[in-house]
Amino acid sequence: MSSVLSDLCRHPIVQAPMAGGASCPQLAAAVCEAGALGYLAAGYKTADGMYQEIKQLRGLTSRPFGVNLFMPQPDTADAAAVDVYRSQLAGEATWYETQLGDPDSGRDDGYDAKLAILLDDPVPVVSFTFGCPTRDVLDSFARVGTLTVVTVTTPEEAQAAQWAGADAVCVQGIEAGGHQGTHRDNPEADGAGIGLLSLVAQVRETVQIPLVATGGLMRGAQIAAVLAAGADAAQLGTAFLVTPESGAHALHKQAMTNPLFLRTELTRAFSGRPARGLVNRFMREHGPYAPAAYPEVHHLTSGLRKAAAKAGDAQGMALWAGQGHRLARELPAGQLVEVLAAELAEAQGSLAAGGQGGAA
């Protein structure tokens, strides 16, 4: 693990920032206390909501932690396509006895206000998803001592992040649960993402800054594999989503290992941007028709998703999950870190022993 990251945590393990409630202060604190790096997800929260969670987390741990921000999105959505999708969702609104949301509820996710708070009262790490900040922003964080990480899905995005001044990149493979953190949403590239091991190797040969690998990782042996491929640390989301400390909805946690949900797919059904989740009724019925319109579709379906959760209907929820979801273990977060670290050590020991045997 690079010194930049090893100064933050004992183990090369990062708990992914999962927007929507899973990455709460209790989860991040438990992960940090166990020697890994915990994250808060500021996405979909107000600036004050983010600040209150930071204060709460600081009351639970004195160890380093991270905060993840969503980058503002360009206005590229086809308004007519969004209107058509709204009409297609009318039956869902009737079924769940709720209203469809306003697609024009904002597209910057309070970015500037969140930046101001994080620069005024710095945290150890800030990461960015859905794009790369300007050099001025990254330099500002460097001046206050905050490490910056940019999520990337291609070697070209990683190179852009390095040029802009990021301290590290989070390399996200196609296996990852939740949203693909592409810098530009190109519908023609849907499903064309790169697998994590191939991507880590390509990015390692493209940039000199540390890499955090993420996407489908659920076991210590997988962490060993991405470290061997060139990563400095591994980030896990789905593995932590089912822990007792996670703020994810109970139905979401249960669905990870429920035999009703056999596989994951990338879909635009819930947000208008490609995101990997468990295939359910909503995804099957609406995924083929969802436009490339983020965050418009996210705002449109927000009330539906909440109503489905309130009704106890997992078939109408966004059940974000990585490809390794069936390997989920319902352990306390701190214990999960310990188990992963032990599995990692065992796997690295086996690799070392194999190498020595081969040399002999």
Image (spheres, helix red, strand yellow):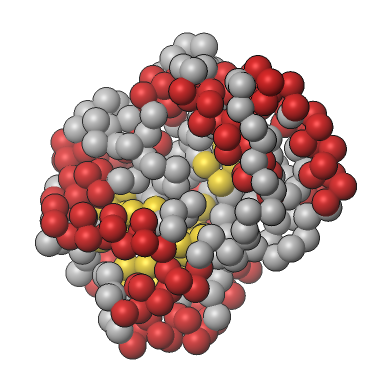
Q: Position of residue 126 (x, y in %)?
A: 37, 67
**Is residue 190 rendered to the left or right of residue 202?**
right
Q: In the rendered view, would you say 242 is above or below 258?
A: below
**Is residue 164 rendered to the left or right of residue 334?**
right
Nearer to us in this view, 74 or 207:
74
Q: In the rendered view, would you say 36 is above or below 311?
A: below
Q: Position of residue 25 (x, y in %)?
A: 25, 49
- On the question of residue 279 being in view, the answer is no
- Residue depicted at 36% across the width and 24% down the height: 250
- Residue depicted at 31% across the width and 79% down the height: 120
Q: Quadrant of residue 149?
A: bottom left
Q: In the rendered view, would you say 213 is above or below 263?
A: below
Q: Position of residue 157 (x, y in %)?
A: 60, 67
Q: In the rendered view, would you say 228 is above or below 22?
A: below
Where's the N terminus, which quadrant? bottom left
- On the question of residue 121 being in view, the answer is yes
**Is residue 58 rendered to the left or right of residue 137?**
left
Q: Position of residue 247 (x, y in %)?
A: 33, 37
